[in-house]
Amino acid sequence: MREMRLAVKALAILGSVVVGLFVLLEPALADNQYDWGVNPALTGEYPGTLVEVHQGSDGVGPLWYRTGHVSAPCCPEIALVQWDDSSQYDIGMNPAVAMGGGFVVEVHQGSNGVGPLWYRVGSFVIFPGANHPVLWWSASHQYDFGAFPAVAVSGTRVVEVHQATSGAGSLWYRTGQIQSANGVLAIAWNNSINYDTGAHPAVSLFPDPDPSGGTTTVAEVHQAGDGVGPLLYLGGTVHDYYSFPQGYISWAGPTNRNYTCGVSANGQYDIGMRPAIAITAYGVGGPQPSHTLAELHQFADGVGSLP
């Protein structure tokens, strides 16, 4: 069994980490071991709540989650993450997680390679006698077939992306809305749609305080092929649930998707592999909130620098 040390440096935006967390944790980049496992993913929400998921071993096996909270008792220079105990929540591999509006959505593969994709929704509840909220998961449900899923959440709105093949090939997205029936959380999914080709997609949503009432900005990045190579960016708009088709994404085309600084006309912004992205709100509350993007990726195959 190959085990990897999971460190707080995993705050490499493998989920939707808000700007406030970047500011708070930027001076505190020393490794601090918090668990054992492989393929960690992380998400966070203001004012510092974190949810981390990972595999307990290589391949299909136990999936574990852990909640935490960022604290800075006197100054940002000594910001710490106070982790709760880890708990197994499912069986699978390649988990991804996102948080928004108090909801947590997790997706993962159910088998090695292309196969069933599963999701579950969670929310934080306070039980009698407890001194802090506890993450309570609903049951898992299959929602698609594919590999390497990624997910983003804004309020009750959800966007998921994945590969259809084990290697570079068609990329698909699926939008949905978190709903509650008799206290049970689930996602009402729309049909999946092919939007590009490539590998290892990642996605993030603009943290709209009321996404149920209109459109939401989405940002996506992925490899153009297998291994180290061009990294591509797509921006778009998730339309409301009264549109047709319901909840569709209008992606910026190849000729006009270079509105983001540093992105070429064909969408390429760098060279590397395994990208991750977060889109955050800057100036929320004003008449025209702006979007701030943060992206990370590997520079080479295997252990190496992280640009």
Image (spheres, helix red, strand yellow):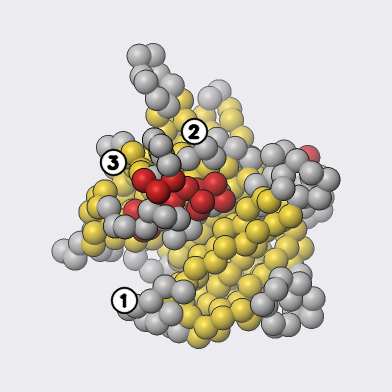
Q: Nearer the viewer, mark 3 or mark 1?
A: 1
Badge 3 is on which residue?
86
Cα–Cα span, label 3 and label 2 = 16 Å
Q: Decide which of 281, 87 is in the foreground and name it.
A: 281
CB within 8 Å, label 3 to label 2: no
Between disc 3 and disc 2, whose residue precedes? 3
Disc 2 target residue:
123
Residue found at x 62% / y 62%: 293
Query: Which secondary structure lies at badge 2?
Result: strand
Q: Amino acid at mark 2?
A: Ser
| Callout 3 secondary element | loop
Q: Of all residues shown, which one is farthest toward the top?
A: 128
Q: Earlier in the sequence, mark 3 or mark 1?
A: 3
N-term-proximal mark, 2 vs 1: 2
The residue depicted at 44 percent of the width and 51 percent of the height is 25
Q: Is residue 167 above or below residue 193?
A: below
Q: Residue furthest left?
A: 1
Q: Are marks 3 and 1 in contact (CB under 8 Å)?
A: no
